[in-house]
Amino acid sequence: MQNENYFQFIQSHWDELLQQLLEHVYLTLVGLFFSIVIGVALGIIMSVYRRLSLPILGFVSILQTIPSIALLGILLPLLGIGAFPAIVALFLYGLLPIVRNTFTGIDKVDPAIVEAAQGMGMTQVQILQQVTLPLALPVIFAGIRTAAVINVGIATLCALIAAGGLGEFIFRGIALNNINMILAGAIPAALLALLMDAVFAVLQRYILAIGKILAMALIVLLMMLVIYQTWPATNGKLTAGFPSEFIEREDGYQGLKEHYKLDLNTREMEISLMYLALMNDRVNVISGFSTDGKIKAYDLRWLKDDKNYFPPYYAAPLATGEVLEQHPQLRQVFAQLANTISNDDMINMNYQVEQFKRDPYEVAKEYLNQQGFSTKINREGSGDLVVGSKNFTESFVLAHLFEIMIENQTSLDVDLKLGFGGTQILFEALANREVQIYPEYTGTGFLTVLKPDKKMREKYIRDADLLYQFIKKEYRQQYNLVWLPPLGFNNTFALLMKEEEAAAMEVDKISDLSSK
């Protein structure tokens, strides 16, 4: 896949791209339809009852300031996953420009024209229908065009709650650092936004002539779309929520499905929303990690990998050769951490952050104190080296743990760059020396970066020690990067279910899912 150019990628993924495009158009149009209906109504109400204009405009303005991912997270436990919460979110984000422009357009109509209409004996409703709204139409349509473009952009985020759309390729591509995949979602989304704007510009020109017929046809069409189910029926099968990277990785769902002969309804979701969906019974199964604190926090059952599919994922510091040559004392620092952190230790640290909302720095400091390490120094200078992390709790904790150890056992000052969005992105930062150290996992380093062929995977993937020695040698030779001694715990992939549901369905291991 990485050797394909953009057009080859489009050709090989055409069916999937077309489906995502149709889903994107569907989400955008239905959300926009309700924004128009409600937004124009609110704008009219504001123009008639002026005292309501400030609270209404203030409310829709506040909606616009809520981060998109936060709004989706709020809607998920209330409305579930898929198209419905996505449409609600798009409807809310489309309100502001339509409400504001409807009010402004009506408000700017020449009062003399309104007085003339009143002098002719027209009622307020007639004046609205035949005078003010037609005159305000260009301004109203400007708001609709703005809302349409906004909705096309925000609809990409709806992929994070399994609503489909072009965001699936974008987020999957970001996770895998696949530029062709990112562009396959981004370019059609940009073109769709331009097309929407152009279509509404044409409609604006001819709306008065075809307005009533078009409005009725649009209402019928969009109501049919609302009734239409974006996702096919589950047919009694279990529904699984997986993040983009897990779906595409060679050690993720594609291989797992074949290995265990699974037939699940899969939904692509953002990691944090995935857990929320599980706890609110929107999905039955999710992917996670064996040291995840949410297993303890949410009372989840870790399904046994009874056919030994997932490879070992032993955590270890990954550093540039230059930083170790320049600061050889770092080897001694990390040697003290070798094989000291157990799976239970890591689960507990993750649990402290996720369940009790503790600061990852404080949790890492507390653990090191318990192990007898000094933790008093916390420098805040310019930074002699940069420690990075991925965008999940455990990586945050480990990055802070590295920071505390380095600053308390050397004279070096550490800068942190936390929350890189995917393995390939953070690895590229390390390879380009923008980051000097970060916590990585042996299985990830082997499969995601080295990309071994089938023969090589079969040779190394099941033997933890052999795998470590192999990647240690290859990284040194290819990238001048050094795998320092493993920290001790194995954070391999895991499939998770709610304990009560797994018990009721008698699911204890992954192979049990194949019969459900």
Image: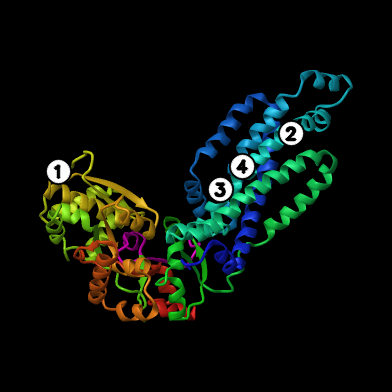
* Foreground tag (4 vs 2): 2
Residue type for callout 1: Ile
Q: CA distance from mark 4 to mark 2?
A: 17 Å
408 lies above or below 248: above
The residues colored magenta run: 281-299
- The image shows residue 501 at horizontal and vertical percentages of 43, 69
Residue at the disc numbered 2 = 138
Q: Which mark is residue 94?
A: 4
Q: Which mark is residue 154?
A: 3
Q: Residue at x 68, y 61 (%)?
A: 228
Distance Cα–Cα, label 3 vs label 1? 44 Å
Please tell me whether residue 15 is drawn above or below residue 138 in the rendered image: below
> On the image, numbered disc 1 is attached to which residue?
377
In which quadrant of the rendered view does residue 121 lie? top right
Vertically, is 288 above or below 457? above
Q: Dot 4, how many residues are within 10 Å of its Cα: few (below 14), some (14-19), or many (20+)?
A: many
User: Which callout, 3 or 1, points at the residue further toward the start of the chain?
Assistant: 3
Report, in whole angstroms, how far the alpha carbon at label 3 lies from the one at label 2: 24 Å
Disc on the earlier residue, 3 or 2: 2
Residue type (three-letter) at the residue carrying disc 3: Ile
Q: Nearer the viewer, residue 483 or 33?
A: 483
